[in-house]
Image (cartoon, grey):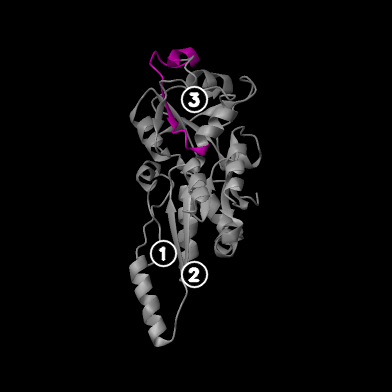
Amino acid sequence: MKTTFQSFGTQAASLFLAATLLVSCGKGGDQKAENVEADKTSGNATTTTAITIKGSDTVLPLAQQEAERYMAQHKDASITIVGGGTGVGVSALMEGTTDIAMASRELKTKEKLELKGAKKDIQEALIAYDALSVIVNPKNKVSQLTREQLEGIFTGKITNWKEVGGADAKVVAYSRETSSGTYEFFKEHVLDKKNYANNILMMPATGSIVQSVGQTEGAIGYIGLAYESPEVKSLAVSYDQGKTYVKPSVAAAQDKSYPVSRPLFFFYDASSESKVKPFIDYILSPEGQKTVLEIGYVPLNK
């Protein structure tokens, strides 16, 4: 049986590797099957509940930690978690290759229609909130930007840091790939639905954005709050044209003073409810919501 899990917090860059990390409880599937057979022989047959979860890299570290703690209490549970982006999770849900899709955005109308066409009765579980963080290299003297300036940077109108009070240096902008819910959320809520510039560097995972921004002085990117690390500097953001700036934090998201907050979801088919609901109920419990805060996201009960 294998148990693979990476602790979170200051090790955000290492989560690039975790995007495809599998988490499972206890021993591997073959070994577990052998154990079940052995139990049957001895008259002590047990049933293993295997749950597959795919989707959002933003939700990934939270789902990993919740699964580890849940499985520690439920020895009959085996949970496998794979990142890749919200779009990947929704597609897998449609194809029937995952029990739960992790998502950092709501379902699109097109996705709802496609899921309905595939005869999926999709259920939604809100599990936490996130404050989307805009990050730069720690050597960058810029510490705050307005929404309009962010729009200018990511749509290609602003190409040099001196245009927003920084050094005379080229802006190197990083984004998640189009399958990412974070990509969609940033486009809709920060870029005012405008298209990204053609020269934006698309990265396959959130951890890779942290790593790239930390290694490039002129870089800028955006990540989930739980991915913040000393390798990068988060910026204060203004949504009132520079009158007030607020830095991303759990407290600022809770009191709604930070303007770029978003819900995090699990989506699942109603036919799988008996299998996945105990795990979802655990995440929504006081213990599960405590884990939400420890990971760096915003609990529902605050």
What percent of the width, then of the height, locates residue 74? 49, 69
Q: Nearer the viewer, mark 3 or mark 1?
A: 1
> Could you classify mark 1 by the number of other residues whose Cα lies within 10 Å: few (under 14), some (14-19), or many (20 or more)?
many
- The region drawn magenta spans 159-181
**Cα separation between marks 3 and 1:** 42 Å
Is label 1 in a helix, a strand or a loop? loop
Residue at the spot 48% in from the left edge and 48% down from the top edge: 92
Residue at label 3?
143
**Disc 3 residue type?**
Ser
Q: In the drawing, what numbered circle is on residue 74? A: 2
Residue at the spot 57% in from the left edge and 22% down from the top edge: 146
What percent of the width, then of the height, locates residue 35? 37, 76
164 shown above or below 133: above
In the image, is residue 200 part of the stretch drawn in magenta? no
Relative side of 200 to 239, left or right: left
Relative side of 23 to 224, left or right: left
Look at the image and tell me whether residue 231 can be seen.
no
> Could you classify mark 3 by the number of other residues whose Cα lies within 10 Å: few (under 14), some (14-19), or many (20 or more)?
some
